[in-house]
Image (cartoon, rainbow, N blue to C red):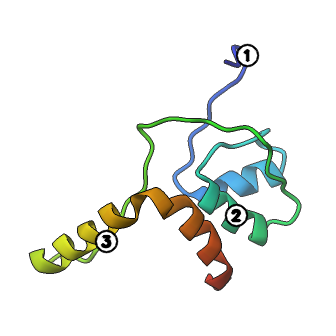
Amino acid sequence: MYPNATLKKFSKVTDLALAVANNKADAFCIDVPTTKLLLRQNPSLKQTNFNHDDGSVGAAVAMPKGTSENLIKKVNQVIKANKQQYSKWVIDETKYVQE
């Protein structure tokens, strides 16, 4: 898509925002909910209208080692039941995230 672009990889999403804010990178592409959070913390950045539809990219839920299988099953059931509303729900709920 952009033959002259150089791909840079970062280990933390906050590093993406810092790289763009400090002119070390031109842009970054991540999921919309995370973008909304980063924009709140970095008002010098702006979201574009670019959409990257990549079915291989998803979200994850991390739980402590030793979490009961019953709880894992329940969490997976909730995820499956709400998968269609995920993006809207996460975007709506970002207003509750503390900085």
Amino acid at the residue labelled 3: Val
At horizontal 28% and vertical 74% (from top left) the residue drawn is 63
Task: State which quadrant residue 34 falls in.
Answer: bottom right
Dot label at residue 78: 3
The residue most toward the right is 44
Q: Give the foreground label among 1 and 3.
A: 3
Q: Which residue in the protein does label 2 denote?
A: 36
| Local secondary structure at mark 2 | helix
Up-down: is 71 above or below 15? below
Please tell me which of labels 3 and 2 falls first in the chain.
2
| Local secondary structure at mark 1 | loop
Q: Is residue 68 visible?
A: no
Give percent across and percent down for residue 25. 76, 40
Amino acid at the residue labelled 1: Asn
Contact (Cβ within 8 Å) of mark 1 with mark 3: no
Q: Which residue in the protein does label 1 denote?
A: 4
Q: Is residue 58 left or right of residue 1?
A: left
| Local secondary structure at mark 3 | helix
Q: Quadrant of the N terminus?
A: top right
At horizontal 63% and vertical 55% (from top left) the residue drawn is 32
